[in-house]
Image (cartoon, helix red, strand yellow):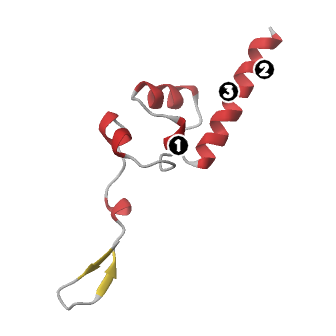
């Protein structure tokens, strides 16, 4: 995002760096696709999906980690 300061000089502003991301229902609902990084833990995924998160809103790396997490969980279930 570009903004103009008082001297009419174009300045690049990074809003993401200014505000920490707090995961709640509203921030997840307002997020664009492929923008949310989710912790690669059972609790992280549980909290994210409980708040209404979807795989479509996860970043590509979070989606790959989630796929590996589910695959490992499936394999562990079938081993017993």
Q: Is residue 38 visible?
A: no
Residue 64, given in percent of the width and then of the height, sits at 67, 41
Q: Is residue 23 above or below residue 59?
A: above
Q: Is residue 77 left or right of residue 59?
A: right
Q: Residues within 10 Å of mark 1 (few under 14, many from 20)?
A: many
Mark 2 or mark 3: whose residue is earlier in sequence = 3
Q: Residues within 10 Å of mark 2 (few under 14, many from 20)?
A: few
Which quarter of the rendered picture does the N terminus lie within? bottom left
Mark 2 or mark 1: whose residue is earlier in sequence = 1
Tell me the residue that label 1 is attached to: 58
Check whether the beta carbons of the residues at disc 2 and disc 1 lie within 8 A of each other: no
| CA gap, disc 2 and disc 1 | 23 Å
Mark 1 or mark 3: whose residue is earlier in sequence = 1
Location of residue 24 (image quadrant):
top left
Residue 22, given in percent of the width and then of the height, sits at 35, 43
Tell me the residue that label 3 is attached to: 70
Identify the residue at image location x=52%, y=40%: 56
Residue 54, given in percent of the width and then of the height, sits at 49, 34
Check whether the beta carbons of the residues at disc 2 and disc 3 lie within 8 A of each other: no
| CA gap, disc 1 and disc 3 | 15 Å
Q: Is residue 61 left or right of residue 74?
A: left
Q: Nearer the viewer, residue 68 or 18?
A: 68
Tell me the residue that label 2 is attached to: 75
Secondary structure of the residue carrying numbered label 2: helix
Identify the residue at image location x=71%, y=34%: 68
Residue 19, given in percent of the width and then of the height, sits at 31, 56
Identify the residue at image location x=78%, y=20%: 75
């Amino acid at each position: 995002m570009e903004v103009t300061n008082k001297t009419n000089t174009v300045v690049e502003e990074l809003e993401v760096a200014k505000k920490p991301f707090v995961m709640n229902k509203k921030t997840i609902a307002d997020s664009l696709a492929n923008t949310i990084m989710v912790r690669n833990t059972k609790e992280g995924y549980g909290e994210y999906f409980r708040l209404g998160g979807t795989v479509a809103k996860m970043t590509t790396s979070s989606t790959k980690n989630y796929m590996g997490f589910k695959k490992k969980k499936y394999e562990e279930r079938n081993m017993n």
